[in-house]
Image: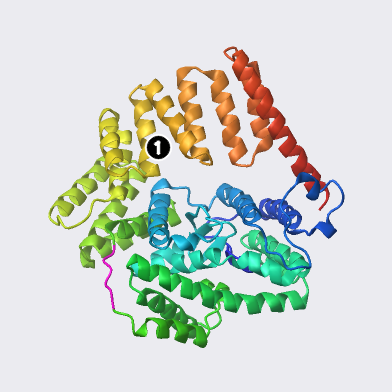
């Protein structure tokens, strides 16, 4: 899935599992409808449509840019579909690492958030191809294959910085402004192609044939300019953060070499990020006279790559293949690679429910880390230790989770594990208070709402349980299920007068949202 609307056709290919063509086609139509309505100019909307709902004007023939608010809304719509896809890597340890890395890039270059001040979110999708993409509004994803192919943290950072460049320069909004109404058809077709590609390449190709030749030519031209601009922004971000600037050159160089060796199967990243000789020369010229600065890879970089190797094919056969890789790496790798290999083997043992072996591997990791005091503390290892304790030593899990949270206060994985540990320890009231605070801090985190609903259930607070589940389903885009949960909450014996008032107000909001979605769907 490519970030900019005009290059979505690189979206997730299947790994070892198949997906229903019907399911993906239906999903594609739903998101396509939303995008068509979002990108329509006022002249294309009937009375009572988007204008009547006071949504931002996306611009007409005067070339106005897509508004930041609408960019974010479109990105959230697409993300709702991605999160429901089985190949979305819904793993908090992976999300922690990617957002920590992305946050460090943005922290060194605050201006990269752009005038809109986007709240960036970094994630991964399970796909062996080498690709990355940026969605409207600051959502940036990477294929697991790309993370595994990166030979240094600087290489991975260079790709993420490049995608940040696309967002910060508002390339989607600029494309809309340049192409105006003729952008509607090809963009919608390419989004449909993106969501259909995994299950039906033929459908994808047919969808991409839609649109006018003039619009397609403009897309190609704008794409080349955007790539060069994103390179320049990305290089500056890398420099500010202290990563090796030649990480971008080495990564692109390896991809080009791969394309020469197999010209009939161009790497995905080069298909969606056209790499011309001029562009490569421009990158090299910009770093030629800059002082070399070495960057030492973090231990978490090696650990997360091992974690993704297991998660990329999380099946018994995939575990066997990964274990063979880790065995070889533990014999020939660097210290960090050896630790990462043992971490991967411990992960596999945990998934095979071989808890004694998993604990033994973690003991080896701790002993190895103790012999290298220069190694920084790892929140990935801390999270895995809590995960093990929750599975085998629940009485110790709470103390370990509390200690780890103090060490890594921004870790979402450790925060959720701390809530689990509180519930396992029978501290239901503390768990509820903690999760309610988390829900206030992370209002768009559906996982927190689901955990809070569980805490209410264990307390026997049935009305609050269903009200919280309604918020969970609302955040995941399942409005009918959210309304059903409110109906159950209203009928709960412990629903207070105040609860009933809140249920009524929330039900009206969700019903209005559902009617608007249905009206838009009928107009497609």
* 196 displayed left or right of 47: left
Report helix, strand or loop for mark 1.
helix
Q: Residue at x 46, y 82 (%)?
A: 256
Residue 51, image x, y percentages: 79, 50
Which image quadrant for residue 337? bottom left
Residue 53 falls within the magenta-colored stretch: no
Q: Residue at x 64, y 18 (%)?
A: 500
- The answer to whether residue 155 is seen in the rendering is no
From the viewer's side, name the closer residue of 449 and 238. 238
Q: Residue at x 76, y 54 (%)?
A: 37
Residue 521, image x, y percentages: 78, 48
Mostly what secondary structure, the magenta segment?
Answer: loop
Q: Which residues are magenta?
A: 292-297
Residue 36, image x, y percentages: 75, 57
Position of residue 383 relative to residue 206, above or below, is above
From the viewer's side, name the closer residue of 115 and 295. 115
* 520 displayed left or right of 261: right
- Residue linked to disc 1: 416
Which image quadrant for residue 171? bottom right
Which image quadrant for residue 404? top left
Quadrant where the image shows the N terminus = bottom right
Number of numbered discs on residues? 1
Residue 294 falls within the magenta-colored stretch: yes
* 502 displayed left or right of 304: right
* 216 displayed left or right of 98: right
Residue 109, image x, y percentages: 42, 63
How is the structure coloured here?
Answer: rainbow
From the viewer's side, name the closer residue of 192 and 162. 162
- The answer to whether residue 370 is seen in the rendering is yes
Q: Residue at x 35, y 65 (%)?
A: 241
């Amino acid at each position: 899935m490519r970030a900019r609307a005009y290059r979505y056709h690189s979206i997730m290919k299947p790994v070892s599992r198949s997906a229903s063509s019907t399911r993906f086609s239906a999903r594609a139509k739903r998101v396509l409808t939303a995008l068509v309505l979002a990108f329509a100019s006022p002249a294309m909307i009937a009375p009572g449509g988007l204008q009547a709902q006071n949504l931002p004007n996306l611009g007409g023939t005067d070339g106005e840019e897509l508004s930041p608010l609408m960019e974010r809304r479109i990105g959230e719509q697409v993300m709702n579909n991605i999160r429901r896809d089985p190949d979305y890597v819904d793993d908090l340890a992976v999300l922690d690492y990617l957002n920590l890395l992305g946050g460090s890039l943005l922290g060194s270059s605050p201006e990269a958030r752009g005038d809109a001040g986007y709240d960036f979110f970094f994630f991964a999708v399970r796909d062996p191809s080498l690709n990355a993409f940026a969605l409207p509004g600051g959502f940036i994803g990477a294929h697991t294959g790309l993370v595994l192919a990166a030979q240094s943290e600087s290489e991975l950072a260079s790709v993420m910085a490049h995608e940040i460049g696309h967002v910060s320069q508002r390339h989607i909004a600029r494309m809309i402004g340049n192409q105006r109404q003729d952008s509607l058809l090809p963009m919608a077709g390419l989004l449909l192609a993106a969501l259909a590609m995994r299950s039906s390449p033929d459908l994808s190709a047919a969808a991409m044939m839609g649109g006018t030749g003039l619009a397609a030519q403009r897309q190609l031209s704008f794409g080349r300019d955007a790539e060069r601009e994103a390179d320049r922004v990305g290089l500056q971000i890398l420099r500010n953060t202290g990563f090796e600037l030649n990480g971008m050159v080495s990564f692109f160089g390896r991809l080009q070499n791969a394309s020469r060796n197999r010209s009939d199967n161009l790497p995905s990243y080069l298909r969606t990020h056209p790499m011309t000789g001029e562009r490569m020369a421009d990158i090299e010229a910009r770093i030629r006279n800059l002082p070399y600065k070495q960057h030492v890879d973090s231990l978490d970089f090696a650990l997360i790559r091992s974690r993704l190797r297991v998660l990329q094919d999380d099946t018994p056969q995939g575990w066997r293949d990964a274990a063979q890789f880790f065995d070889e790496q533990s014999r020939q790798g660097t210290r960090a690679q050896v630790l990462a290999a043992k971490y991967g083997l411990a992960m596999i043992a945990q998934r095979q429910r071989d808890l004694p072996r998993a604990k033994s591997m973690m003991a080896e990791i701790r002993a190895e880390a103790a012999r290298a005091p220069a190694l920084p503390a790892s929140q990935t290892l801390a999270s895995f230790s809590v995960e093990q304790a929750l599975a085998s030593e629940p009485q110790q899990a709470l103390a370990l989770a509390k200690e780890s949270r103090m060490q890594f206060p921004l870790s979402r994985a450790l925060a959720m594990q701390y809530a689990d540990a509180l519930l396992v320890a029978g501290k239901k009231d503390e768990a509820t208070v903690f999760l309610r605070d988390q829900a206030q801090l992370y209002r768009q985190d559906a996982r927190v709402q689901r955990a809070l609903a569980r805490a209410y259930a264990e307390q026997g607070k049935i009305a609050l349980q269903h009200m919280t589940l309604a918020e969970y389903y609302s955040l995941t885009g399942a409005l009918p299920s959210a309304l059903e949960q409110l109906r159950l909450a209203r009928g709960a014996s412990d629903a207070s007068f105040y609860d009933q008032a809140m249920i009524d107000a929330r039900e009206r909001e969700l019903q209005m949202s559902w009617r608007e979605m249905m009206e838009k769907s009928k107009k497609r």
